[in-house]
């Protein structure tokens, strides 16, 4: 059975596009059944429309509190009978109620080798720290920020003359490779969470 996936994004949508293309190329036993964004005029919304995938803009500032916002998203996900949620450049922290409803079914990509450089501007944090290597991580989302069980990582070198821009590009190239691969494994039920680790069974 193909997994029914929801894609969450707030911006450009290049990771969403990499996953969409991998699905089109039949590398992934799944389909993106809806897109949720917290912003209206962003790349991921435009892409969703071009792909003829239903897009829901759910802006938390339109709800009185976080629980009402969370419930609105849960209602939509239930309507589409979603099996998995892919956060791809989604710039909001999901509340525990949301995470608990889809525990083990929410994936995220982060532009660093977690647990290093959690949170915002991970590439800038890496440059400031002077690390020689950084990279990206796909992980399951739990109640903490950027700390859920790790599914996949890729390493890139950091060069003396790197800027946030050049480093981000190098990392993004790897993001577009490992995120679709992690989604493929998820859709094949090949990922098992054992304690705080992910074991790949394929
Ligand atoms: C990526 O660098 C991702 O790791 C981070 O936000 C960026 C999103 O880019 N979470 P895009 O919207 O997928 O192009």
Image (tube, helix red, strand yellow):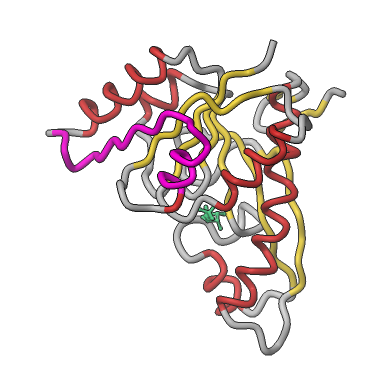
| Total residue callouts | 0
x, y percentage for residue 170?
A: 69, 68
79 over 24 or under it: above or below: above
Which residues lie in the magenta part?
Answer: 44-63
Residue at point 25% right, 40% down?
59
Q: Residue furthest right?
A: 202
Q: Residue furthest bottom?
A: 161
188 over 112 or under it: above or below: above
Left or right position of 68 against 174: left
Q: Is residue 45 magenta?
A: yes
Left or right position of 102 against 1: left
Residue at point 78% right, 32% down?
27
Left or right position of 92 against 61: right
Residue at point 76% right, 35% down?
25
x, y percentage for residue 43?
A: 44, 53
What is the quadrant of the C terminus in the image?
A: top right
Q: Foreground: 101 or 181?
A: 181
8 over 70 or under it: above or below: below
Q: Is residue 55 magenta?
A: yes
Residue at point 44% right, 21% down?
100
What is the quadrant of the N terminus in the image?
A: top right
172 over 52 or under it: above or below: below
């Amino acid at each position: 059975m193909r997994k029914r996936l929801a894609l969450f994004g707030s911006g450009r949508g290049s990771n969403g596009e990499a996953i969409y293309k991998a699905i089109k190329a039949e590398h992934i036993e799944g389909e993106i059944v809806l897109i949720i964004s917290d912003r209206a005029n962003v790349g991921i919304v435009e892409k969703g429309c071009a792909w003829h995938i239903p897009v829901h803009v759910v802006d938390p500032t339109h709800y009185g509190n976080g629980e009402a916002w969370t419930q609105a998203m849960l209602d939509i996900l239930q309507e589409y009978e979603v099996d998995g949620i892919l956060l791809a450049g989604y710039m909001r922290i999901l509340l525990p109620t949301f995470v608990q409803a889809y525990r083990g079914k929410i994936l995220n990509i982060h532009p660093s080798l977690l647990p290093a450089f959690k949170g915002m501007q991970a590439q800038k944090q890496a440059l400031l720290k002077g690390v020689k290597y950084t990279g990206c991580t796909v992980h399951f989302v739990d109640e903490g920020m950027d700390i859920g069980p790790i599914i996949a990582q890729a390493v890139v070198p950091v060069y003396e003359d790197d800027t946030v821009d050049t480093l981000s590009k190098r990392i993004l190239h790897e993001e577009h490779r490992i995120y679709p691969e992690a989604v493929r494994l998820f859709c094949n039920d090949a990922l098992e969470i054992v304690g705080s680790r992910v074991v790949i069974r394929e």
